[in-house]
């Protein structure tokens, strides 16, 4: 069955196991709980890839968090970002005086997050930080200022735990290397 880690030839080795994800996400939740004590942070999940991470991270935070989501598309091919980002779904809530944490699945070039941070910063939040589950070793801009990072991984294309190729593999419980051809 395509999409099952044991039977799909394009699914490579596990890069981050589901146990490691769970353990690290608990640590991130505890860190955020301590850093935001007595506040009610607004978690802004970046659809669709961060959906799993948002669900697990939010349950590891012992504070009255609120949720919102944005959907963005970057112009470029499926596996390369161009840096030009289009908002497909904007936030529902006003950011003024909110403690905002952007929750993102993976940072590759960092262009998507650089755009999002700048865009949200203009909306008057009291604070604005980034929590990224995965950061690829390599070419990010040094000014991205990632406050919370789950794992640094080698710069291969990965799928699972929210991350897709052509909308598939998001439901895998671990992050795997993807060995298939790059989708057009
Ligand atoms: P960046 O703008 O180059 O940092 O790209 C970030 C976005 O590209 C992420 O939010 C993902 O949606 C997507 N992306 C980057 N690398 C991967 C990957 O290895 N697997 C799946 N999606 C990825
Ligand atoms: Mg994403």
Image (spheres, rainbow, N blue to C red):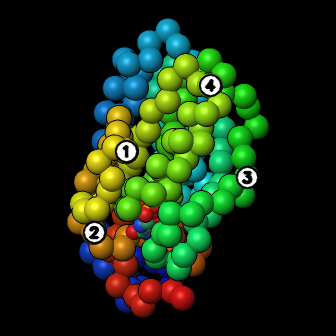
Residue mark closest to the camera, 3 vs 1 = 1
Q: Mark 2 or mark 4, which is nearer the start of the sequence?
A: 4
| Residue placed under numbered mark 2 in the picture | 155
Dot 3: what SS?
strand
Determine the quadrant in which ligand 1 lies: bottom left
Q: Is residue 1 above or below residue 167?
A: below
Dot 2: what SS?
loop
Residue in view at x 53 percent, y 13 percent: 39
C-beta proximity under 8 Å, tags 4 and 2: no
CA neighbours of label 3 inside 10 A, class few (<14), some (14 to 19), many (20+): few
Residue mark closest to the camera, 4 vs 2 = 4
Q: Mark 2 or mark 1, which is nearer the start of the sequence?
A: 1
Q: Mark 1 or mark 3, which is nearer the start of the sequence?
A: 3
| Residue placed under numbered mark 1 in the picture | 144
Q: Residue furthest top?
A: 38
| Residue placed under numbered mark 4 in the picture | 124
Q: Is residue 178 above or below residue 38?
A: below
Q: Is residue 8 above or below residue 170?
A: below
User: 171 and 157: which one is in front?
Assistant: 157
Give the Cα separation between the discs numbered 3 and 4: 19 Å
C-beta proximity under 8 Å, tags 1 and 2: no
CA neighbours of label 1 inside 10 A, class few (<14), some (14 to 19), many (20+): some
Residue in view at x 59 percent, y 60 percent: 85
| Residue placed under numbered mark 3 in the picture | 89
CA neighbours of label 4 inside 10 A, class few (<14), some (14 to 19), many (20+): few
Residue in view at x 49 percent, y 30 percent: 128
Q: Mark 1 or mark 4, which is nearer the start of the sequence?
A: 4
């Amino acid at each position: 069955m395509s999409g099952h880690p044991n039977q799909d030839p394009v699914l490579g080795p596990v890069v981050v196991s589901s146990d490691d994800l769970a353990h690290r996400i608990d640590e991130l939740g505890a860190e955020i709980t301590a850093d935001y004590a007595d506040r009610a942070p607004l978690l802004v999940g970046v659809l669709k890839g961060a959906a799993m991470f948002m669900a697990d991270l939010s349950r590891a935070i012992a504070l009255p968090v609120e949720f919102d989501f944005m959907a963005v598309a970057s112009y470029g091919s499926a596996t390369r970002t161009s840096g030009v980002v289009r908002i497909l779904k904007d936030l529902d809530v006003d950011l003024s005086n909110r403690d905002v944490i952007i929750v993102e699945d993976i940072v590759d070039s960092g262009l998507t997050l650089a755009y999002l941070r700048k865009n949200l910063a203009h909306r008057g939040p009291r604070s604005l930080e980034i929590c990224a589950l995965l950061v690829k070793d390599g070419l990010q801009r040094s000014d991205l200022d990632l406050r919370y990072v789950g794992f640094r991984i080698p710069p291969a294309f990965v799928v699972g735990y929210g991350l897709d190729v052509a909308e598939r593999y998001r439901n895998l419980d671990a992050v795997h290397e993807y060995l298939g051809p790059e989708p057009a």
